[in-house]
Amino acid sequence: MKRAAMAGFAAGAAMMVGAALGAVSNTDPKPVPDTDTEVSNPMVGGQAMLPDRDIMENMSASPMHTTFVNNLKDTGVAAALKANAQFTVFAPTNAAFAAAGNQPKSTLARRMSYLIVPGKYDSQALLRVISESGGEAKLRTAEGGTLIARMNGPTNIVVMDERGNTADIAIYDVHDKNGIVQVVDHTLEPSGPARQVAAN
């Protein structure tokens, strides 16, 4: 019974992320197509991040992201991140999850989906949409909520959740074959009741 409930929970989480691909409205900022064929990725936790691997493969290689990877797998969101689509993932480190303390398992899929934005936003794309939006870019998440990206000083991008919590991007632009990972130093969470993603 428990296994069947977990399978249904995981399938729902994967559908939430998949549905988000069609849910971005015309008013949402658009990422810039990646035209750079020579990508040089940063190391994460001392491990090489290879641009020909998908998001889950690279994050699974990072010793800084074991909690994040386990959460993605436990909720079924990991399967969606292996899909043939482009995503930007704001990936909290193990230290960020530890600092946030215990969180209810019942909202885990929602919180993981909130860290995923359809489209490929490297640092240059984020800087562009921040500038074009007057200093604050609203990014629609796979969960159906909003993350706000803005500058924190002349060179650092900070991401704010719906509760007003902020996270700095600690490691920029981990290029993957199906998107970008931005490593963040704090967890980010949606607010209010659960939302249903609806295609526009």
Image: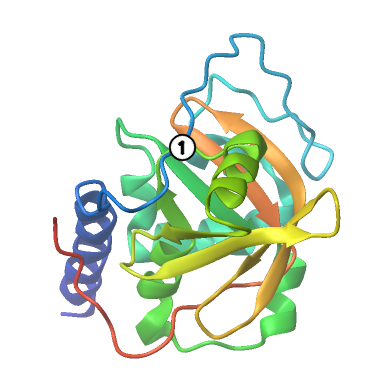
In the image, residue 87 lies at what x, y percent?
Answer: 43, 42
Circle 1 sits in a helix, a strand or a loop, which is it?
Answer: loop
Query: Taking 53 as reference, is 86 left or right?
Result: left
Q: Quadrant of residue 45?
A: top right
Decide: is 67 above or below 108.
above
Q: How many marks?
A: 1
- The amino acid pointed to by label 1 is Pro
- Work out which quarter of the rendered image holds the C terminus and state it: bottom left
Where residue 152 sits in the image (x, y, percent)? 79, 62
* Position of residue 188 in the picture relative to residue 140 (left or right): right
Residue in the foreground of this view, choosing between 64 and 118: 118
The quadrant of the image that shows the N terminus is bottom left
Residue drawn at the location 30% of the way across and 36% of the way down: 83
Q: Which residue is mark 1?
A: 31
What residue is at 50 percent from the left and 41 percent from the top?
Answer: 56
- The picture places residue 164, in percent across and down from the top left corner, at 60, 83
Taking the image as shown, residue 75 lies to the left or right of residue 112, namely: left
x, y percent for residue 55? 51, 38
- State the residue in front, 111 or 3: 111
